[in-house]
Structure formats: C-alpha cells, structure tokens
C-alpha cells in the first residue's frame, strides 16, 4: 500500500459531490481516480477546496487550507501551478492536466516544472501534442480517462429507439452550431426527431455562475427552438444521465478545440449510443470510424451522418452493437493501474 496525496485548487467539491450533482469532466475524473486508487488498496488523501474533512469510498478529503503533507509515495497535483510546490518530499510526482497544454508555457508554470520535474500526464495523443518538446517536464505519459462503471452495463436493445438525440457537454462548446445544423438540416429531414440538451451552469459550480452571461444566450436559443424538437433539460447527475442515455438513439456533438478527451462522447458509446462528431482536436480519437459513429468535416457531412443514424434502423443496430462490444473496456481501474506504473508504486 502506498501513501498517495492528491491536490486541487479549483471549485468546491468532494468525493460525494459526484453522487449529488452534475460535475465537469476534470472534477469527475479527479474523483474517479482517487476512488480507483483507494479501491486498489492505497492510502489516498485529497486536499482541495472541500468544505470539511470527510472519508468517502475509502478516500480522505481534507480542506487544502488545513495544509498538505510534506511527504508521500506519490503526489498528484491537479492542473494548478501553485500546487507544484506542495508535498516537496514526495518520492514521485505526477502533474495531471486536462486542458490543452499551452497554458503551461507561462513562466509561472515553467519555472516550477523545471524545479519539480514531474511526469506530466495527458489524456490522449492529441492532448500530448499541445505541449512542445522543448518545454520542461520530468517525463510525459498518456493515460486516457476511464469510464465510470455506471455507464458500462447497458444491454443490447432489441430494436432501434425513436430518433431522440442527446447533447451532454458544455453549452459553450458549439451547442449554438449544433442548433443551427439541427434547425436548418436535421429536423426538416426527420420531423419527429427530438434534441434533448443536458447542459447548464450548475455543472461548473461558482465558475459556471460566472460564465452564465455567456452561456445564457445559447441556452435561451435552445429554449426558443421547442417547436423544432429541442428540449432544454439542464444538467443532471450521472445516475440520472444513465437512464436518459438508455432512452436515446444518438449523441451529436461538434467538438471543440479546447477538448482533450470528452467523457460525454465516451459515456454515450459505452451505453450503446452511436455518435456523430466533427473532426476537431481529439474527436477522432473517441470514435471507431464507420463502426461506432462518424467523425466528419463540415456541417453538411455532419447533418448527413446524423440523419442516417436517425432513420436507418439496420445501420443504427450495427453501430449500437459495436459500441457495446468495443467502447467500454477501459475503466478507471485501468487508468489507476497506469498511474501506479508511472508513479512507481505498482
């Protein structure tokens, strides 16, 4: 058993938050990794902006303001540059990042990375390519996000469901573009189709409230398209999302240059939902082209692919089976095993 310390200085959350309300991908992944490492027998302490100390699923959560231990077998700071100077006597450090790595080129990161020399963990090849070879690091590794177990138990459906589409990402990540394509191309071709939008500010805590001014017009636009089959549902916890995905037919998502993994797309396929993406950033890494979905270029190709999945039951059934067979094998336990290997504690 290794002593593992993890730190985060972003929004307020703890291990139970994932069960209580929707969370962003980075926070969800952080919780899942802590849980998976604890489940593998390690002593895991998380120091972050949680409101009070508690133990949840074998992980101790402690307010970071109370201090961080000086030593650990493995130290995992999450994203923030100020965290790089903490736990100075750790035997090994993994710096886990979730956004395109250009921000690490700022001097406040580079001098700390030069001193600390942590292994920087990226979530995919596209993500890793955003950090130039000359920049400081003590090593580089790619560890894809794991799948939350909740999404990995869907059974094969006997027949294709009605044309219900879901959007489960950040509304600032091209929801406005999708609404344009939906209104002008997809809905006219499939008049009975529905687009259920599970998105809103609640996912991002106080940070989401700060972005409400930008998200508002996009969500208002979605609300205004009720007559076009668009239904604004708002964000929901993972347990509820599983049930919603079980009733859907496909996930349509353009993608975003700021996306480095996209758990929403991975979760949908694990539930057996084929997807349509645009070929942006890491999107091509998330789909098995022509088997579990499509990754295309341009609005016209996107709409054509979406219409095919919503109208061709035989095609949908083939893609559905491929999703279940091929897109849910990498779980958080596998990702945690990789962190063990990188950290030398396996």
Image (tube, helix red, strand yellow):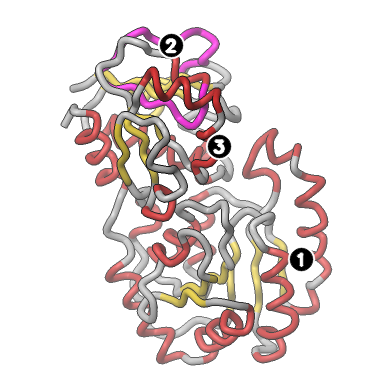
Q: Residues within 10 Å of mark 1 (few under 14, many from 20)?
A: many
Indicate the position of residue 115 as horizontal and vertical percent values: 39, 18
Residue 8, magenta (yes or no): no
* Rendered view: 304 above or below 222: below
The residue that mark 2 highlights is 68
Give the residue displayed 60% in from the left and 30% down from the top.
Answer: 11
Q: Are marks 3 and 1 in contact (CB under 8 Å)?
A: no
Instruction: State which quarter of the image contains the C terminus.
Output: top left
Where residue 128 appears, as percent x and y from the top left, is 40, 47
Image quadrant where one finds the N terminus:
top left
* Magenta residues, start to end: 62-81
The local crowd at label 2, few if under 14, some if 14 to 19, many if 20 or more residues have their Cα within 10 Å, is many
Q: Secondary structure at mark 3?
A: helix
Asked which secondary structure carries label 1, the reply is: helix
User: Nearer the viewer's eye, disc 2 or disc 1?
Assistant: 2
Badge 2 marks a residue whose secondary structure is: loop
User: Which residue in the structure is indicated by mark 1?
Assistant: 222
């Amino acid at each position: 058993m290794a002593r593992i310390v993890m730190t985060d200085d972003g929004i307020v959350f703890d291990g139970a938050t994932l069960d209580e309300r929707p969370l962003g991908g980075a926070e969800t992944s952080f919780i899942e990794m802590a849980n998976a490492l604890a489940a593998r027998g390690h002593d895991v302490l998380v120091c972050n902006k949680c409101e009070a100390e508690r133990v949840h699923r074998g992980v101790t959560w402690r307010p970071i303001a109370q201090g961080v231990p000086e030593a650990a077998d493995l130290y995992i700071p999450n994203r923030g540059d100020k965290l790089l100077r903490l736990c100075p006597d750790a035997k090994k450090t993994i710096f886990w990042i979730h956004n395109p790595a250009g921000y690490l080129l700022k001097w406040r990161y580079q001098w700390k990375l030069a001193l600390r020399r942590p292994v920087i963990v990226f979530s995919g090849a596209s993500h890793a390519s955003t950090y130039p070879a000359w920049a400081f690091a003590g090593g580089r590794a790619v560890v894809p996000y794991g799948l939350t177990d909740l999404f990995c138990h869907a059974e094969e459906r006997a027949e294709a469901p009605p044309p219900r589409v879901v959007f489960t990402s950040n509304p600032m990540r091209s929801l406005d573009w999708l609404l344009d394509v939906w209104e002008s191309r997809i809905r006219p071709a499939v008049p009975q189709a529905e687009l259920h939008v599970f998105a809103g500010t609640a996912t991002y805590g106080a940070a989401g409230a700060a972005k409400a001014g930008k998200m508002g017009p996009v969500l208002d636009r979605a609300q205004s398209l009720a007559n076009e089959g668009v239904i604004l549902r708002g964000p929901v916890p993972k347990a509820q999302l599983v049930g919603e995905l079980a009733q859907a037919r496909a996930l349509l998502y353009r993608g975003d240059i700021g996306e480095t993994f996209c758990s929403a797309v991975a979760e949908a396929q694990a539930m057996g939902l084929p997807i349509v993406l645009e070929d942006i950033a890491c999107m091509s890494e998330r789909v098995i082209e022509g088997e579990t979905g499509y990754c295309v270029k341009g609005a016209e190709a996107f709409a054509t692919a979406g219409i095919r999945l919503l109208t061709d039951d035989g095609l949908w059934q083939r893609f559905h089976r491929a999703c279940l067979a091929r897109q849910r094998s990498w779980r958080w336990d596998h990702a945690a095993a990789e962190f063990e290997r990188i950290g030398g504690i396996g």
